[in-house]
């Protein structure tokens, strides 16, 4: 094992051996090399005459570039913030601004226990990094029965993890805390688990109530007290789109200092929060009482990034940074939130139509982009195909009974027609 990896591992063990035990074999072997990038960083500070280190071309004391590309950005972003490589961990100013955003959005959090967010190529990349760091063959991944299908590739196919599911909703149509507890307890002998919490949930659009979030934290803490190491992986892709009586902070806040055997990891980003899906800017943020552990996890994360994509898009990071610092940011964010909430409210209103009850029951939703319906005596995939072919309506079948509808991409004025057509398609098949 590389001596740099050994040093990082020793730093982790010294402050919390449970975190070391959570690492996958790959995670234990990872490190950030003292190579070209570290030498170039040193030269950037001291090479005042000539800096002949990093592999870019320069012209007239700025990065060489095509003028027609620079013209697309005008004078709003300088060449130095577009064309050179960004650091593997991301632009430092962007990391700092995003950390301030996390703290502002989550008042329960203490700045001292947060690592500096590490920039990823959006959220899927962040999830993949966590899988590499913590998941070995057979590692249990605890998930609700309604989850984003891409988790299967990330955790099962790539890393050999084993998914263990529980029903998302209980009989009272709330978050199924007892189901989560049972799933965790069933894996006590494994030594470590990944508990993946995604709120607002994709596909259902559900976020727990304050009482439910506290119960979730209590269940994880109880399991940790019993000797289970828990990687609490928080997928906050749709963070902030809370329309009703749910928690308004990330559940990361409830777990950040819960127990030494719980390692909370927040995956979030501008992608969906700020409606810049194609920019691919996400973040990984670790929480720990130990600065040494935060540093070691950052170095290992940088090592994965360096060994895979090298670094994320510099132009995207620069644009997101300017957006976050803009006076218009909060104004426009409130405008878009109101628009999304209006669509969610209209969906709730339309779903009260009595005639729909013979075809489906809606699952609870209070946040995010989506909602789901549970079909009665109709196959979801058959209905999906029928709606597409006969009515030009696109939906997503989740399993045999559940159909996902993204109200996020339907104008409020069109939502009633959308559900009327879904009901019409259901009537065709039921008839």
Image (cartoon, rainbow, N blue to C red):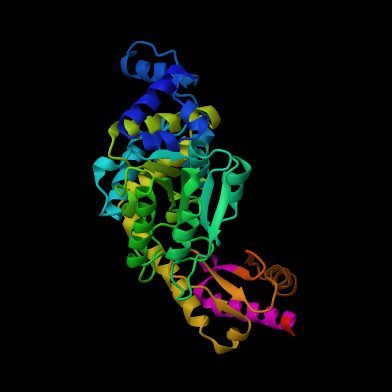
Asked whether residue 250 is in view, the answer is no
In the drawing, does residue 406 fall left or right of residue 320?
right
What is the count of numbered marks?
Answer: 0
Q: At which x and y percent is residue 386?
A: 73, 72
> Foreground residue, 181 or 37?
181
Q: What x and y, as percent, mark residue 396?
A: 63, 64
Q: Which residues are magenta?
A: 404-429
Q: Position of residue 133 (x, y in %)?
A: 48, 36
What residue is drawn where x is 44% and y is 15%? 53
Residue 303 is one of the magenta-drawn residues? no
Q: Picture quarter containing residue 214? A: bottom left
Camera-nearest residue between 153 and 404 = 153
> What secondary structure prevails in the magenta region?
helix
Is residue 260 rendered to the left or right of residue 119? left
Q: Is residue 203 visible?
A: yes
Determine the residue positioned at 54% across, 43% down: 139
Q: What residue is at 31 percent from the left and 14 percent from the top?
A: 46
Residue sitting nearer the eye, 281 or 247 = 247
Q: Residue at x 31, y 49 (%)?
A: 258
Quick check: 29 above or below 255?
Answer: above
> Residue 407 at what x, y percent from top left?
53, 69
Quadrant of residue 157 within the rendered picture: top right
Residue nearest the observer in this picture, 261 or 145: 261
Name of the residue lying farthest toward the top: 49
Where is 281 relative to 51, above or below? below
In the picture, the quarter occupied by the C terminus is bottom right
């Amino acid at each position: 094992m590389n001596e740099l990896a050994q040093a990082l591992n020793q730093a982790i063990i010294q402050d919390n051996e449970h975190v070391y035990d959570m690492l996958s074999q790959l995670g234990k072997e990872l490190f950030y090399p003292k190579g070209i990038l570290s030498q170039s960083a040193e030269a950037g500070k001291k090479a005042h005459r000539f800096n002949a280190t990093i592999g870019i071309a320069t012209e007239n004391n700025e990065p060489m570039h095509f003028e027609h590309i620079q013209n697309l950005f005008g004078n709003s972003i300088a060449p130095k913030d577009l064309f050179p490589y960004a650091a593997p961990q991301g632009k430092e100013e962007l990391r700092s601004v995003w950390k301030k955003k996390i703290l502002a959005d989550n008042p329960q959090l203490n700045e001292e226990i947060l690592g500096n967010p590490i920039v990823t190529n959006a959220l899927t990349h962040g999830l993949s990094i966590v899988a590499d760091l913590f998941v070995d063959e057979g590692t249990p991944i605890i998930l609700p029965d309604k989850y984003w299908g891409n988790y299967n590739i990330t955790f099962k196919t790539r890393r050999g993890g084993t998914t263990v599911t529980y029903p998302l909703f209980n009989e009272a149509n709330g978050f199924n805390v007892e189901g989560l507890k049972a799933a965790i307890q069933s894996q006590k002998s494994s030594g470590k688990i990944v508990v993946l919490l995604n709120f607002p949930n994709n596909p259902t659009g559900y976020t727990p109530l304050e009482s439910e979030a506290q119960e979730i934290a209590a269940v994880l803490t109880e399991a940790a007290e019993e000797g289970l190491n828990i990687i609490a992986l928080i997928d906050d892709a749709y963070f902030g789109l809370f329309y009703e009586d749910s928690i308004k902070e990330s559940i990361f806040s409830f777990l950040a200092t819960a127990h030494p055997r719980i390692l909370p990891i927040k995956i979030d980003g501008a992608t969906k929060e700020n409606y810049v899906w194609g920019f691919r800017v996400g973040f990984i943020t670790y929480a720990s009482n130990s600065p040494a552990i935060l540093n070691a996890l950052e170095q290992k994360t940088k090592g994965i990034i360096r060994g895979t994509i090298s670094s994320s898009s510099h132009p995207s990071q620069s644009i997101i940074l300017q957006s976050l610092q803009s006076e218009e940011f909060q104004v426009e964010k409130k405008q878009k939130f109101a628009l999304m909430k209006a669509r969610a409210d209209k969906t709730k209103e339309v779903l009260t139509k009595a005639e729909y009850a013979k075809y489906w029951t809606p699952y609870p939703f209070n946040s995010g982009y989506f909602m789901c319906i549970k079909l009665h005596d109709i196959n979801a995939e058959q209905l999906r195909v029928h709606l597409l072919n006969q009515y030009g309506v696109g939906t997503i079948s989740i399993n045999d009974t559940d159909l996902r509808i993204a109200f996020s991409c339907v104008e409020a004025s069109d939502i009633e027609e959308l559900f009327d057509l879904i009901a019409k398609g259901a009537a065709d098949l039921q008839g």
